[in-house]
Amino acid sequence: MEFYEYMAYELIEKIKTKEFTIEEVIQKSFQRIEETEKKLHSFVHLHKTEALDKAKKLDNNLREGKSIGKLYGLPFGIKDLICVKNSPTTCGSKILEGYLPPYNATVIEHLIEKEGAICLGRTNMDEFAMGSSTENSSYGPTYNPWDIECVPGGSSGGSATCVASGQTSVSLGTDTGGSIRCPASYCGVVGLKPTYGRVSRYGLVSYANSLDQIGPLSRCVYDSAMILEIIAGHDPLDSTTADIKVDNYTQELKNSLENKVLGVPKEFFGEGLEKDVKDRVTRAIKKLDSLGAKTIEISFPHLEYAIPTYYLIAMSEASSNLARYDGLRYGEMSDDLSGDIYEVYSRTRAEKFGSEVRRRIILGSYALSAGYYDMFYIKALKVRTLIKNDFQEAFKHCEAILCPTMPTTAFKIGELVDDPLKMYLMDILTCPVNLAGLPALSIPCGFDTNNLPIGFQIIGNYFDEKSILNIGYLLEQELNLYRKMAPIMNRGI
Ligand code: GLN
């Protein structure tokens, strides 16, 4: 087995049993990055020196018999919008060039400071997490390791490619309308969006704060369960986190599915779903049946309103959140300081924000402006409640919901850049989950005729990550695809 094929839990085991030193693990990770990064562009900043220094320190502590935390120096990729103290955090945007946060996000405190993980670098993303392809990054796109002519999905595209290509076994992403699950699906890895309020958002740069959640990406369900155990929980620094007990997710993975009722919403298999996606997902549902679960058809009457509702709310919140980037309080100012302060603000924002971010600020400001507020924003909030109620009704009859993650497999780079509306429609099966604040897991369930991965989505009830991880784990073992590595190739040649 190649080094880069190890799962996170296997690497930890090998460090514990002294088969590898942490320094070796970090060296080998950077070696893999050096071999593959030119083709993939998963990272926007790499921290080789810092990572090796920390590895040496942890190895020393280990030799001296000191505790170094549960993660034993495990290397991570961290999305470029989660604050790491004194380390560039730029949200894939020119406007935050040179920004060094003076503090750590709570998830970083848990993973890195407390449990001894090591950050290899910051992963590429759509600017301010706005997009489904990672093409909206000011650093340029990331390429899908299954076919480098295709997008990796987004906005956490870098976090998915670094895992799929073996540059690292685990990473952190964020999901506002699908940004963990979409790239997980397109890159053939596991992605978990936790319940809203399960993981602290303190130190996460907000896109749309009533929807955003941080979560793990990994190559197997066990690793995501292990990371969630560490990052989940109440945080006094984020008042939206819930004071609800964190389960032992890794210990509940093998529970039997005997007699569990799982719902399949017929509307999630409607128009626009590619045939290969439908076939593979249906086959995976049958596998769950054979594992003892009972699947029933359920209905989700308001699905057709999910996209407009999501985009209205997300853009409205974004327009307000991004008002702080004026070059003075945050961000880099334009070189041209002529005119009054308002001219400088608007020049700075016009120069430093990309076109998708500007589009959303304009649309969001419009939806929130006097006269339109009731018509658009308030209406969207009401429909959000209807969508939430659809899920609540469904959970009266079943324990979890099964459906595809994305309606298609990865599309070609450049294919949708001029058609933002079409790109927005890709979120149809993921964004209802964020509107309701529920947890959802995406795991690979097969490949299409072009050998591109297909994602299977399992949606759970509030704070029931335990059940979706359990279902995902048993299905993963049954399908047995999780050791298959992305070939990193260009099929067009
Ligand atoms: N594609 C969605 C959007 O552009 C989701 C993004 C996300 O989850 N961050 O808003």
Image (cartoon, grey):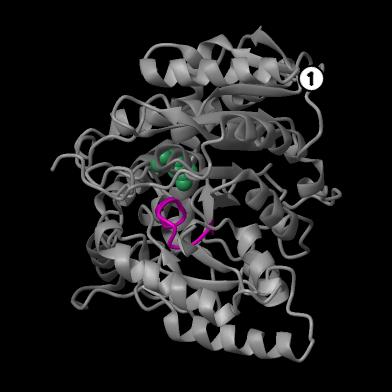
Q: Quadrant of ligand 1?
A: top left
Q: What count of labels does the image hold?
A: 1
Q: Secondary structure at mark 1?
A: loop
In this rendering, position of residue 346 left or right of residue 309: left
Image location of residue 345, percent across then percent down: 31, 67
Q: Residue furthest left?
A: 493
Image location of residue 447, percent across then percent down: 40, 29
Residue type, numbered disc 1 = Lys
Q: Quadrant of residue 342?
A: bottom left
Image location of residue 76, percent across then percent down: 54, 66
Q: Residues within 10 Å of mark 1 (few under 14, many from 20)?
A: some
Nearer-the-camera pick, 432 or 355: 432
Residue 381, visible in the rendered structure: no
Q: Residue at x 23, y 33 (%)?
A: 419
Nearer-the-camera pick, 431 or 1: 1
Q: Which residues are magenta?
A: 160-171
Residue 254 higher or lower than 41, as above or below: above
Q: Quadrant of the C terminus?
A: top left
Task: Indicate whether residue 25 is drawn in magenta.
Answer: no
Q: Residue at x 27, y 43 (%)?
A: 147
Q: Residue at x 45, y 70 (%)?
A: 29
Residue on which the image places disc 1: 260
In this rendering, position of residue 173 left or right of residue 140: right
Task: Indicate whether residue 169 is drawn in magenta.
Answer: yes
Q: Residue at x 36, y 60 (%)?
A: 42
Residue 233 higher or lower than 184, as above or below: below
In this rendering, position of residue 231 left or right of residue 451: right
Residue 392 higher or lower than 466, as above or below: above
Image location of residue 409, percent across then percent down: 36, 30
